[in-house]
Amino acid sequence: MTPIEMPPATLFSAEEIQERVRVMARTIAGARLVPDIAMPVLVGGFVFAADLVRALAWEGVSLDIEMIWLRSYGDKRVASAISMIAGPSEQIAGRHVLVIDGVLDAGRTIAKAVQLIEAAGAASVQVAVMLDKQRPDRVASADYVGFTVGNDFVIGYGMDDAGRHRCLPYIGKV
């Protein structure tokens, strides 16, 4: 018999997340430079990206969408080498790109995404993340942040622990 797993402690409820997404969308829509294409980072950014692009549409900003798939955690809680599974296409050349990811930890995944997008000829690159751990040793930053958090390992709302808990409607900590 498998022991019953306790649900992870909630950091941000589904309601708090949805309100924050709406506020972020209004901020992005009112920015001086509004993106014209969203580039969610798979897999951890897909839930946030879906909510954000729909909220942006409600604000009158309809974005094209192209995915980038980078992997840095695999089945571990410590980031390893970043591998690219699917990169940007020639369709982003000259475009204003909004990279969307779930969490900014050390920033290596975001930095790699921005590097690849710039190399593909994007006119500009902005970054939106739901969570920013604000580590002093990070190598990238975000233009738009949902919430700042400590260095806890976070799950839910697209982020996982070796594939588990990604579908939770809230953000929790392990």
Image: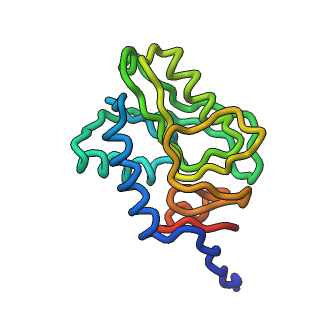
Q: How many marks?
A: 0
Horizontally, residue 6 falls left or right of residue 94, namely right
Whether residue 11 sits left or right of residue 57 in the image: it is right
Quadrant, the C terminus: bottom right
Please state the horizontal and vertical placement of residue 41, each as a whole percent of the image. Answer: 51, 39
Residue 32: where, in percent of width, then height? 35, 30
Residue visible at 47% across and 31% down? 126
**Residue beneath the point at 31% across and 51% down:** 55
Measured as percent of width and height from the top left, residue 16 is found at 45, 67
In front: 129, or 85? 129
Above/below status of 7 relative to 164: below
Residue 116 or 87: which is nearer the viewer?
Answer: 116
Along the horizontal axis of the image, is 22 left or right of 113? left
The quarter of the rendered structure image containing the N terminus is bottom right
In x, y percent, where is residue 154? 64, 60
Q: How is the image coloured?
A: rainbow
Which quadrant of the structure image shows residue 17? bottom left
User: What residue is shown at x 54% (from left), y 60% (from top)?
Assistant: 166
Q: Of residues 26 and 44, which is closer to you in this image?
A: 26
